[in-house]
Image (cartoon, grey):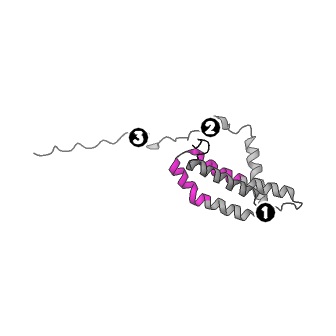
Amino acid sequence: MTSDLLTFGPAAAGAVIFLLVAAWCFSHRRVDQSLAVLGLYLGLLDGYLKLRIGSPVITLGRDILVAAIAGGALLRSMNSQHPLPIPPLGGLVLAFAAVVLIELFNPSAPSMAQGPRPPVLHPDPRADRPARTRRAQAPALP
């Protein structure tokens, strides 16, 4: 007799394997190998699973892997004594983030709670002209 708790379906086995891979990405020291695993997942499984299962929950897998890689790298960098160097174009990224934050708190900007504004439809300049009438065609001969 087997218990229902001990019988795993393919979905449960896949979820367990995925969580083990995410834990490996979090704890692995070499970020380049973790990013290679992310690239393989995105290239081989992500699209197939989205089309096969059709559930929006599948996109959570991509987010979990990215968060595991970034969280592990951040945790390891916090534990090390070396300061993190700013990349060459890091100043532009920080400037863009500052502009976005300024626009978020701009009181005259439209509220995000209202949703996107509908597009402005410009009137057709030809609408004021009278419609052309077709010439009456001669009746078809029998």
Give the residue type at disc 3: Arg
The disc, 2 or 3, on the residue closer to the chain's N-terminal end is 2
Q: Which image quadrant for residue 17?
A: bottom right
Q: Residue at x 58, y 54 (%)?
A: 46
Give the residue type at disc 2: Gly
Q: Nearer the viewer, mark 3 or mark 1?
A: 1
Instruction: Say which of 34 and 91 sits in front.
Output: 34
Q: Residues within 10 Å of mark 3 (few under 14, many from 20)?
A: few
In the rendered view, does 18 fall on the left or right side of 133?
right
Give the residue type at disc 1: Pro
Q: Residue at x 57, y 57 (%)?
A: 45
Q: CA distance from mark 2 to mark 3?
A: 36 Å
Residue 19 appears at what percent x and percent y? 67, 51
Q: Nearer the viewer, mark 2 or mark 3?
A: 2
Q: Residues within 10 Å of mark 1 (few under 14, many from 20)?
A: few
Q: Secondary structure at mark 1?
A: loop
The disc, 3 or 1, on the residue closer to the chain's N-terminal end is 1
Q: Nearer the viewer, mark 1 or mark 2?
A: 1
Mark seen at residue 87:
1
Q: Which residue is mark 3?
A: 129
Q: Which residue is mark 2?
A: 115
Q: Residue at x 71, y 52 (%)?
A: 67
In the rendered view, does 55 fall on the left or right side of 23?
left
Magenta region includes residue 16:
no
Q: From which residue to which does the magenta span run?
A: 41-67
Name the chief secondary structure element in magenta: helix
Instruction: Say which of 50 and 83 sits in front.
Output: 50
Q: Residue at x 40, y 40 (%)?
A: 129
Q: CA distance from mark 3 to mark 1?
A: 60 Å
The disc, 1 or 2, on the residue closer to the chain's N-terminal end is 1
Q: Secondary structure at mark 2?
A: loop
Q: Is residue 69 visible?
A: no
